[in-house]
Amino acid sequence: MSQIKFSVSNTNSKAKSGAVVVIGAAPVGEKVQLVGSDLLSTSELKSLGVTGKPETLTRTLAGGQSVAILGIGSDSPDVDSWRELGGFLGRALSDVDALELQLPLTDSAAAESVLEGIALGSYSYAGKGKQPALSSVHLTTALSVDKKSLKRVTVLAQAVKETRDLAATPANELYPSHFAKLAEGAAEKHGLKIEVWDEKKLAKDGFGLIAAVGMGSVRPPRLVKLTYAPKNAEKHLALVGKGITFDTGGLAVKPLGGMLGMKYDMTGAASVYAAILAIAQLKLPIHVTAYLCLAENMPSGSAMRPGDVFKARNGKTVEVTNPDAEGRLVLGDGIAAASEERPDLIVDVATLTGAARIALGVRYTGLMGSAAAVNAVKQASQAAGELVWEMPFAKEIRSYIDSPVADLQNSKVGSSFGGMLVGGWFLSEFVGNKADGTKLEWAHLDIAGPADNEGSAYGYTPKGPTGVMVRTLVNLAEGMCA
Ligand code: BES
Ligand code: MN
Ligand code: ZN
């Protein structure tokens, strides 16, 4: 993996020779000026057509150097804008080997943000062959940015890249046992404990829902539990990810248009996987477990049928009224398993419902859960610049999933109203109790909208898999250490 090397100093002498120098430009009244540099005059900028508008870039030669003039707008950018501007730079200049930044950053948070944006924006899918050329970024500034922050930026960008790469990997290459193998390699490399349930052990240990979803495929299901437990940990965070390596809809087979993107249906599992690896690399003093609920949802002679009933890990029985509502099934078992250790907080991440895309569009993650958990996630997401929107536990929803033959059913028959809420409510039925009998803290993230950017790239977000919520999860862990 090619990783960008970041450096910071108050002189440009440490920058790689031949680096492209990035200078900010902003509109000032009717004119445009470079900010903090007099390398080019107002009239030169005018003749180059520089507007100073955000996310514009003009490349030229000045003072014997290759210069890239970045429009930053008339308002001083905030931390989120710097991340987006960085992303824009990373995309626009990913073919350049080295950059030197001379930007009007007001504090170290802004500095970290622009670097993070560059690292996130310069992404391209590892399987595509051609990788970004960008190998070093030097930031010339009087601000102090410590080694630890640079390491954090690098680790976060790597985690997002890992998620995007896994999501983009075709389902014929990435299937449950293969994902589990990758996790075994990573666990060994980063010193995590790992436990893998294969289809036999899943059945034996009562994971009836993961087993049910996986039984239609010749590629059997897996449950992977990763544990990072440093000695200095006080709190315990459990992460649960939906890892449907391909979702055909099962016997409720999707039409081609709806099935096409379904290799991405394991993005939740990829996100929690990348997050726990990042948390371990940052050596955060927190106990984290990650459950990857891996299965391929296929129609076949051995697939689960509408009307079949299965018993979950927590003992509840579930009638499968729709084999295409498979994510909540595998997560039900995963959340139940995570609950057994009574962590301080459980967060699940899933491309759970098409309804989330209808309700919230493609940039907001749907958020449901207990009040404290929801607040913690909101805070963490805000710091990451990732958008979440809280959805309600509407009273009428429970009756939608009453089953005549089991404790609950996995979807309402004949109506898709409130589909995101039904999914979230279903999952809540698998959250276990604290020692005092009250429910464990739990939050659910429905990333069906923002996990995949079907449109064109913007800011630090490429076309295709985005790696959304990975940085939020790491922030959340950091917040629990404080
Ligand atoms: N993986 C899909 C949800 C999805 C749809 C994610 C589109 C990304 C883009 C999920 O398994 C699914 O099929 N959900 C059904 C639920 C329904 C059957 C209750 C849906 O949203 O239609
Ligand atoms: Mn489905
Ligand atoms: Zn699915």
Image (cartoon, rainbow, N blue to C red):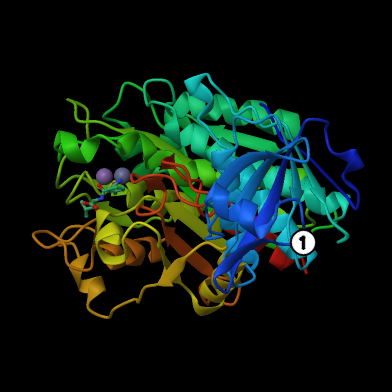
Name the residue nearer the viewer: 18 or 384: 18
Which residue is pictured at 19% across the width and 26% down the height?
A: 300
Residue designated by label 1: 36
Query: Does residue 481 sit above or below 96 in this rendering?
Result: below
Above or below — where is 2 with respect to 129? below
Label 1, secondary structure: give it: loop
Classed neighbour count for the residue bearing mark 1: other residues with Cα under 10 Å, few (<14), some (14–19), many (≥20) = few
Q: Is residue 340 among the parts visible in the rendering?
A: no
Position of the C terminus, as image quadrant, is bottom right
Residue extending farthest left: 414
Spot occupied by residue 331 in the image (x, y as percentages of width and height):
41, 50
Residue under the point 40% across and 54% down: 447
Q: For the point 79% across and 58% down, which residue is it?
A: 233
Q: Position of residue 448 (x, y in %)?
A: 35, 52
Q: Is residue 43 above or below residue 90?
A: below
Q: Is residue 43 left or right of residue 62?
A: left
Where residue 285 appears, as percent x and y from the top left, is 80, 57
Quadrant of residue 413 within the rendered picture: bottom left
Observer-nearest of 310 and 291: 291
Relative to the observer, which residue lies in front, 273 or 431? 273
Quadrant for the N terminus, please. Answer: top right
Residue 404: image quadrant is: bottom left
Q: Position of residue 135 (x, y in %)?
A: 72, 31
Say which amino acid is labelled 1.
Gly
Q: Is residue 389 visible?
A: yes
